[in-house]
Amino acid sequence: MNHEPRRAFVTGITGQDGSYLAELLTGKGYEVHGLMRRSSTFGTRRIEHLCGDDAAGRRPLRLHDGDMSDANCLVRLIREIQPHEVYNLAAQSQVRVSFDQPTYTADVTAIGALRLLEAVRDLQDSVGTPVRYYQASSSEMFGEVAETPQRESTPFHPRSPYGVAKVYAHWITVNYRESYGLHASCGILFNHESPRRGETFVTRKITRAATRIKLGLQEKVLLGNLEARRDWGFAGDFVEAMWLMLQQDDPGDFVVATDETHSVREFCEEAFGRLGLDYRDHVAIDPRYFRPAEVDLMLGDSSRARRRLGWRPRVGFRELVAMMVDADLELARREAETRHADQHR
Ligand code: NAP
Ligand code: G4F
């Protein structure tokens, strides 16, 4: 009997989704290999709890230096690790930033996916090992939506350099599936959030600010378009759908969403409301946060994922906001205590 653990290679391991996926995979007994890019500080905050040895003295998560812009390094790592499953989560994922850094976004988010697919194809060709591949596609590809709700057949009309880069990554993945018989699937994921969400995304920006305001650490928060609507789910639920896609006999493309939409204004109302505050007293509009082109309405139809994968989200909108506010309140409390201690030193 073969007791070799399944090996997964995950790019974007240090990001929000990478950390939840690493937890899911290590929990299922996988040996997880994560790609981590070099920076002047160590960026493993979200996965530190997974970095040691387990009870049996095994190291379930191993980190490898590398970058999506370096094709040779991706080929070398994939050859060395020989993963059974590859999850491509790495991206310049901030939509607003993509307007200021469109070339960089295209290089990492679009061509990065091509580099990784080439590395996977190289392994399949040279060693003959079948590899299953997951591409992190995005609802941002629907952009100026052609229909509501958005489903797998809805045409793409991206509204940002990020969205355009994701359309390239999506179609090149489909193309490698059709051209080379690769077991490659795309998850068209709608917005998903958590206490680990980057602080520049609107949900986390709001929950960080609301909790700091509650404790007197800041007075107001500057936001852009409050009328934009998003289909917000919980990241921990969404990474399960990624894994399920790679367990199917046949690859495919799947919308993953809660099938509910709320405005940024409603998110503010809910988050500040949980703290007994009125968002109208603390939110100011700053045109700097408006985008050259906006995506006004996102609402998914995830019926294919529910039917074929047996997937469904467990955390609803109110629970998600509560989870994020409660976690950030704890952070703000610690910050207030440190300030207090510093002042009395
Ligand atoms: P995230 O928190 O921004 O994480 C992005 C990850 O990519 C980080 O680990 C980052 O590393 C890494 N990365 C960036 N540039 C890289 C490079 N040049 N080489 C290697 N790694 C690089 O994003 P997320 O929310 O977890 O999202 C995961 C994926 O799903 C992304 O592809 C995103 O575009 C896509 N997606 C997200 C959502 C959502 O709502 N969250 C929805 C649809 C699709 P550092 O830690 O060093 O920055
Ligand atoms: O939180 P956001 O920055 O997320 P956005 O643009 O929807 O993108 C996220 O979800 C995509 C899935 O559709 C992912 F592919 C992508 O990687 C990323 O994770 O902004 C949400 C909405 C936008 O309409 C924005 O204009 O919030 C509006 N907004 C209003 N004020 C703001 C702000 N967004 C940010 N980041 N900061 C603000 O101050």
Image: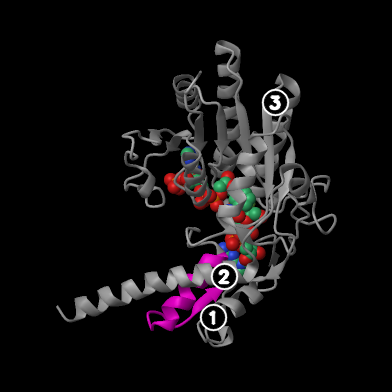
Instruction: Establish if 304 lies above or below 278.
Output: above
Q: What's the CA distance linking mark 2 and mark 1? A: 9 Å
Label placed on residue 321: 2
What residue is rendered at 50% in x and 37% in y? 10
Q: Secondary structure at mark 1?
A: helix
Measuring from the top left, give residue 333's x and y in whole percent: 35, 75
Residue interval drawn in magenta: 202-224
Task: Kindly indicate the quadrant of the structure image that contains residue 203.
Answer: bottom right
Measuring from the top left, give residue 225's x and y in whole percent: 65, 71
Q: Secondary structure at mark 2?
A: helix
Q: What's the CA distance linking mark 3 and mark 2? A: 38 Å
Q: 135 or 108, which lies in front?
A: 135
- Quarter of the figure with the C terminus: bottom left
What residue is rendered at 71% in x and 29% in y? 249
Instruction: Establish if 245 lies above or below 76.
Output: below
| CB of mark 3 near ligand 1 (< 8 Å) | no
For residue 273, side relative to residue 40 (left or right)? right
Measuring from the top left, give residue 87's x and y in whole percent: 56, 36
What residue is rendered at 61% in x and 20% in y? 130
N-terminal-most mark, 2 or 1? 1
Q: 101 or 204, which lies in front?
A: 204
Q: Amino acid at mark 1?
A: Arg
Give the residue number, with chain letter if any, for mark 1.
Answer: 274
For residue 259, side relative to residue 344 (left or right)? right
Residue found at the very far front of the displayed protein:
1
Rate crowding at label 2 as few (under 14), some (14 to 19) or many (20 or more) other CA atoms within 10 Å: many
Q: Nearer the viewer, mark 1 or mark 3?
A: 1
Q: Is residue 213 magenta?
A: yes
Rate crowding at label 1 as few (under 14), some (14 to 19) or many (20 or more) other CA atoms within 10 Å: some
